Image (cartoon, grey):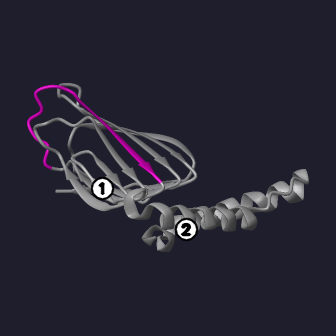
């Protein structure tokens, strides 16, 4: 239950609470958020008592983090997709050098937090999409809903195409030398 003490979790709870207040005030739609939260909490506890830790077991593979914390770094195995679900992860793409072809990498973060390290002045195209979360960019800009594209590409070089999807999560991007 460490995810309940995560800042992202409480941020999402506050956003959902705020949306319910807006729905009630403007559209006169009453959604009992607190009652639903308490009901799901009791269901969670009941299932955890019946099944134990088998249902929610922290896991990290070479390309997935689920209910855990971990690190990914680029390897020759060319994983094309990394997933962070209900966890925290760091993805280091700063060591990619001497590209012989274009690389495509997809990163998905759902109900968690992530950090992406890129090499400064490396040829990349970054396509980001966020819903009910936030992405902080190296230049200090941040987006909380919508899409943003960044391109650091020379015409005569191969590129790393990165698709970053963030849903109910927080993500930060940093440059490394």
Q: Which residue is drawn at 68% across and 59% down?
A: 16
Any mark on residue 146, and which?
Answer: none
Any mark on residue 59, and which?
Answer: 1
Question: Eyeballing the image, is 19 above or below 148?
Answer: below
Q: Is residue 24 left or right of residue 93?
A: right
Q: Tell me if residue 109 is in the magenta stretch.
A: yes
**Residue 136's image quarter?**
bottom left
User: How would you rate the neighbour count of disc 2 (Cα within 10 Å): few for under 14, some for 14-19, many for 20 or more?
Assistant: few
Any mark on residue 45, and which?
Answer: 2
Of residues 124 and 38, which is closer to you in this image?
38
Q: Answer with mark 1 or mark 2, whichever residue precedes in sequence.
A: 2
Question: Eyeballing the image, is 110 above or below 53?
Answer: above
In the displayed orientation, state which residue is furthest to the front: 50
Estimate the x, y position of residue 62 in percent, counting from the top left: 21, 47
Estimate the x, y position of residue 97 in percent, counting from the top left: 10, 41
Which of label 1 and label 2 is nearer to you? 2
User: How would you rate the neighbour count of disc 1 (Cα within 10 Å): few for under 14, some for 14-19, many for 20 or more?
Assistant: some
Residue 92 visible, this orientation? yes
Q: Which residue is drawn at 71% across and 64% down?
A: 17
């Amino acid at each position: 239950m460490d995810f309940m003490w995560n800042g992202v979790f409480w941020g999402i709870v506050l956003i959902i609470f705020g949306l319910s207040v807006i729905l009630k005030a403007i559209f006169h739609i009453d959604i009992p958020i607190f009652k639903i939260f308490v009901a799901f909490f009791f269901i969670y506890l009941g299932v955890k008592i019946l099944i134990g830790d088998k249902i929610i077991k922290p896991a990290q593979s070479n390309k997935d983090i689920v209910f855990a914390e971990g690190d990914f770094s680029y390897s020759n195995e060319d994983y094309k997709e990394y997933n962070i679900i209900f966890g925290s992860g760091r993805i280091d793409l700063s060591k990619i050098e001497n590209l012989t072809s274009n690389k495509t990498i997809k990163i998905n973060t759902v109900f968690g937090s992530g950090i992406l390290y890129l090499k400064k002045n490396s040829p990349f195209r970054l396509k980001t999409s966020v819903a009910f979360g936030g992405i902080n960019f190296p230049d200090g800009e941040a987006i909380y809903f919508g899409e943003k594209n960044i391109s650091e590409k020379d015409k005569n070089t191969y590129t790393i195409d990165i698709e970053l999807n963030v849903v109910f999560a927080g993500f930060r991007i940093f440059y490394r030398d």
